[in-house]
Amino acid sequence: MNRKQSEHLYEEALKHIVGGVNSPSRSFKAVGGGAPVFMKRAQGAHFWDVDGNRYVDYLAAYGPIITGHAHPHVTKAIQEAAANGTLYGTPTELEIQLAAMLKDAIPSMDKVRFVNSGTEAVMTTIRVARAYTKRNKIIKFAGCYHGHSDLVLVAAGSGPSTLGIPDSAGIPASIAQEVITVPFNNAEALHEALKKWGDDVAAVMIEPIVGNFGMVMPKAGFLEDVCRLTRQYGALVIYDEVITAFRFHYGSTQTYAGLANHDLIKPDLTALGKIIGGGLPIGAYGGSKEIMEQVAPLGPAYQAGTMAGNPASISAGIACLEVLQGKGIYEEMERLTLKLTKGLAESASRYEVQLTINQIRGSFSTHFCDHPVTNYDESQDTDGEAFGAFFRAMLNRGVNLAPSKYEAWFLTTAHTEEDIDFTLEAADASFKEIST
Ligand code: PLP
């Protein structure tokens, strides 16, 4: 596949943009390097690059594009919003509408506040939890990504209950010391950490279904344990649902049918982003009235935003959720995903490539290993080189995956049977290529 123009643009980008990309996950560093593909146009489940090559897309912009690219209903909403002025700096009726839609779908949220990204949403939930509990420490789970604010950018601990080490330069050790990292799916480790530091823990932050070291379900009873233990020590439970809300069904993890007792897994605060903005920048957080009343202008926890609640993002979010309310939407994504994962597993085994697939409704992750992946250690213990080779082989056959072994494949409402057949053909040839 000829990608000369992408290569040329990458050289140009390197002259002007640090690393040539505006988010490190877009670089191909983790899959053997080289020029990332410069896309020119996207429609439905497809991308076209600057050299005119077409790709079936499973990146979905790292999650938000669940209705496919340029969905007509979403596009119309954005066009109408833009024509009426993109930013007011005043409240609008649209914000009430989206907030009410989120509250209806996510019962633990009495009050909502819109921000501009998942990072901001998570960062603010931590501030609110600290304001409410008057404590400082946060417990997070190894390998869970919660955006790039200082506090949550802390290395996955090497063992249970390690005190944090900054994952990035520029984060003072004193901040990392406020974060305790424990392994996902390990309630005992959480309990140990709470026994040791519980009196100073403001919140336990979790991706209730993990999307950042592959797609990983909580084991039966794990979220119940997280909620029970956290409350036992007087801390708040924060669900980071930036990826997961509206991903598997119309709602959040708390109400996901695949998980048991909804009340026992109810968070105190929830952070949202991605899908709820229909492809435009957005974040939101919410929780009970009592906790949310910590936030300015009602309470002492300050949080603000020039762009927050802008009409274009809010309109796109409303339109996206309206599409997702359609009958059978999630079932169809799941049906196609099952066909795809079944075919991938068959091809991998045909060429004796070791592959573990973690599938949850319309999303899944592929781990090049022969063991289950239920936590970060197991996800790290997989063959990154094999993934890199598979990634490149798929790209050369017109299938766009995220350039990292940890990222998920996302189906959208725009993927068709034909796209799946095309992908399976590409995958069969790719597994064959990497196995020889
Ligand atoms: N939380 C989770 C679970 C995420 O996956 C991400 C981004 O991938 C974030 C937070 C940060 O969101 P954003 O990139 O919009 O700042």
Image (cartoon, helix red, strand yellow):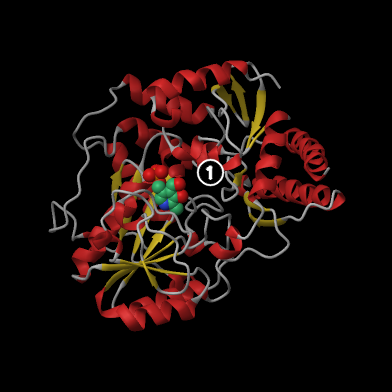
Q: In this view, does 17 lie to the left or right of 303?
A: right
Q: Where is residue 75 in the image (x, y as percent from the top left)?
A: 47, 26
Q: Is residue 91 left or right of residue 235?
A: left
Residue at image location 18% in from the left, 34% down from the top:
90
The image quadrant that residue 58 belongs to is top right
Q: In this view, does 90 lie to the left or right of 35?
A: left
Query: Foreground residue, 90 or 328?
Result: 90
Can you tell me whether the CB of the residue at mark 1 lies under 8 Å from the nearest atom of ligand 1? no
Q: Is residue 10 left or right of residue 397?
A: left
Q: In this view, does 66 lie above or below 2?
A: below
Q: Which residue carries the number 1 mark? A: 324
Residue at image location 83% in from the left, 41% down from the top:
432
> How many marks are shown on the rendered structure?
1
In this rendering, does residue 344 appear at all? yes
The image quadrant that residue 14 belongs to is top left
Q: Where is residue 80 in the image (x, y as percent from the top left)?
A: 38, 23
Residue at image location 53% in from the left, 71% down from the top:
185
